[in-house]
Image (cartoon, rainbow, N blue to C red):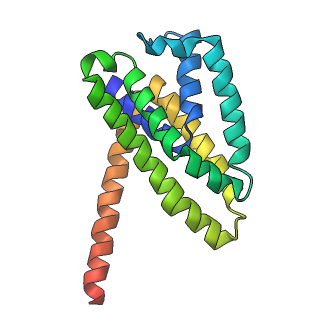
Amino acid sequence: MDILAAFGLSASAGLNAYIPLLVVSLLAKFTDLIQLSEPWSAMESWWIIGLLIVLSAVEFVADKVPAVNHVNDAVQTLVRPTAGAILFAASANVITDISPVLSIAAGLLIAGSVHVVKSVAIRPAVTATTAGMGDVPVSIVEDVVSTSVSLLSVILPVVIGVLMLLLAIWIIWWLTRRNKRARNQM
């Protein structure tokens, strides 16, 4: 189950770096749902929690302001994969079951991939097709999804596993269908 939680937390960091970090910090501080081992237990510090609240608020606002949201995505290109790496490695017991290098690399790749799809494909398309009017609703949906996936990853990681499987099936179906259309048009 820990590996499913790690995947879900890393993916949600690709949408918003600070929400999953804050969720993990608060759940580790106030519940027994997640146990952070050293050095990751530093995330339970009030200083870190306070910093994550401030950074979450800054990103929430920055992501809703036209033009600033694109600058924010550029800045977050380094932050989100790093947050994904931290979350993957810090997930309960994963660091002891999997090589730290492998877990950090997996977190970087997962969060980085989600971030690239969001900032290079989805957001520019939304901005172009809606003249920027769709950016705020899409940003709010991203924040809700990041929060929901983060919570589900810790509370019900098997749900994240099922969602990942369904997403993989859908992507394969979509790619197959797209390839068939391309062949038929030739």
Please say whether residue 33 is visible from this viewpoint.
no
Q: Residue at x 68, y 62 (%)?
A: 134
Nearer the observer, 39 or 14: 39
- Residue 41 is situated, as x and y percent measured from the top left of the image, at 48, 11
Quarter of the picture containing the C terminus is bottom left
Q: Residue at x 27, y 77 (%)?
A: 180
Nearer the observer, 58 or 97: 58
Q: How many marks?
A: 0
Q: Residue 103 vs residue 154: left or right? A: left
**Above or below 159: residue 125:** below
Q: Quadrant of residue 159?
A: top left
Q: Residue at x 35, y 23 (%)?
A: 2
Q: Quadrant of residue 156?
A: top left
Q: Residue at x 44, y 13 (%)?
A: 36
- Residue 84 is situated, as x and y percent measured from the top left of the image, at 44, 34
**Above or below 170: residue 129:** below
**Above or below 80: residue 91:** above
Please say whether residue 174 is visible from this viewpoint.
yes
- Residue 125 is situated, as x and y percent measured from the top left of the image, at 56, 67
- Residue 97 is situated, as x and y percent measured from the top left of the image, at 25, 18
**Above or below 70: residue 180:** below
Quarter of the picture containing the N terminus is top left
